[in-house]
Image (cartoon, rainbow, N blue to C red):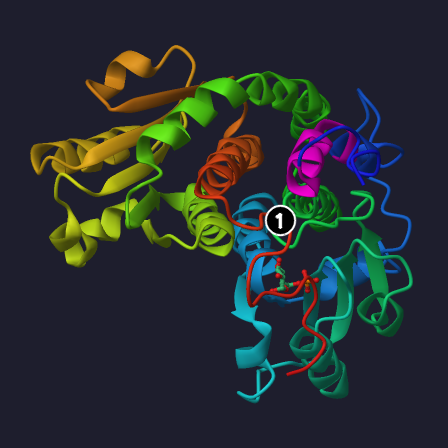
Amino acid sequence: LMAEKGGYRHFMLKEIYEQPRAIADTVASRVKDGHSDVYLEGLQLDDEQLRQFDRLYVVACGTSWHAGLTGKFLIEKLARVPVEVDIASEFRYRDPLVTDRTLIILISQSGETADTLAALREARGKGGKALAICNVVESSIARESDGVIYTHAGPEIGVASTKAFTTQLVALYLLALRLGRARGTLDAQRCIELTEALLTLPRKIEEVLELDEQIEAIAKTFMSASDFLYLGRGNQYPIALEGALKLKEISYIHAEGYPAGEMKHGPIALIDEQLPVVFLCPRNETLEKVVSNLEEVRARDGRVIAVVTEGQENLLGEVDALITVPDIIDELAPVLMSIPMQLLAYHVAVFKGTDVDQPRNLAKSVTVE
Ligand code: G6P
């Protein structure tokens, strides 16, 4: 079994470390350095069709839904088309507004999640076009969709999704580029810049993985907390949700993700000297706002764990734990920020002695409603 785990203690850790490779494989052959074309071999939609859509839905469950929430930012920004993100078990029962000008993007690692499959059938029944983002080749959702973009994460064994999630983010990035080019909202030069940035991602993830020991020490400091709050704004809000979900799933610590600006409308009441608050603060236009939220937490004696872009540490003032990640364009920062979230949850769970790869009550793929 140790051999299957490639020498790692758990599949989850092995899969966290596989991310540079998984992302490189998901990108490979789809973009070329210095080119503005994005090849998505299974898309089955030409530029003319990509221009026709007036609305997109992204529908998924669990971690895949969090990927979808990030996809909304990417697609709306780069392709300027409205995107609604929905949980599959909600979407399927609310008589969604689907026409022949609607594209429904189903995200599913396994391609077998019952609610997502049902949402796909509902949407196609109403005349919408369906595009799957799946990891498992020839899975039900991939087969029943009009087109498919495969993530090349390789088999994911750990129940808590890691490399499947970050490769979903990359697949959505590629799709956003393709949509933006087809719809004329993304010029060739900008597309080349975004492609170049994407090609640097595996190496930057390697750098974040080098923080493993530091994050393990942070996990040790905070493992006894009974609750965690995760805060981020904009495209980091879904990463806050995902960070909280990872911790809940494998360490059984209650955790909540929230948009940082919404903290004042509720979660602020929870802050005391016991509560760790994880702040996602990459360099971007809302950094100052996030820093002011961080100051509010500190003023109430909350314990701050901050993830920040290198060179920006001084903007934060005093924090209880600081994780520094390399600089990257804002569109890709969610991928990079996911890595410390995974490692933090992983190490807390290991310290707590839980069954990391097979957490209680959870299944890798939920094929019943
Ligand atoms: C289960 C798994 C999650 C996963 C979700 C959706 O709840 O435990 O890790 O995110 O299903 O799975 P899918 O295969 O559709 O992405």
The kind of secondary structure element at disc 1 is: helix
Label 1 Cα neighbours within 10 Å, binned few <14 / some 14-19 / many ≥20: many
Residue found 25% across the figure and 29% down from its top = 288
- Decide which of 322, 227 is in the foreground and name it: 227
Residue closest to the far left? 299
Please indicate whether residue 351 sits to the left or right of residue 53 in the image.
Answer: left
Image quadrant of residue 280?
top left
Marks counted in the figure total: 1
Q: Indicate yes or no whether the magenta region holds residue 17.
A: yes
Q: Where residue 115 sits in the image (x, y, percent)?
A: 65, 78
Vertical side of 356 occupied by 68: above or below? below
Q: Quadrant of the C terminus?
A: bottom right
Q: Where residue 273 sits in the image (x, y, percent)?
A: 13, 38
Q: Indicate yes or no whether the magenta region holds residue 138.
A: no
The reply to whether residue 37 is in sight is no
Residue found 80% across the figure and 20% down from its top = 34
Q: Where residue 30 sits in the image (x, y, percent)?
A: 85, 37
Which range of residues does the magenta coloring cover? 10-22
Residue found 86% across the figure and 66% down from its top = 139
- Decide which of 269, 74 is in the foreground and name it: 269
* Main secondary structure type of the part rendered in magenta: helix
Q: Where residue 173 sits in the image (x, y, percent)?
A: 66, 42
Vertical side of 326 occupied by 45: above or below? below
The reply to whether residue 212 is in sight is yes
The picture quadrant for ligand 1 comes to bottom right
Please indicate whether residue 160 sits to the left or right of residue 290 in the image.
Answer: right
Identify residue for label 1: 79
Image quadrant of residue 200?
top right
Q: Amino acid at mark 1?
A: Ala
Vertical side of 289 occupied by 89: above or below? below
- Decide which of 307, 221 is in the foreground and name it: 221
Residue found 89% across the figure and 34% down from its top = 29
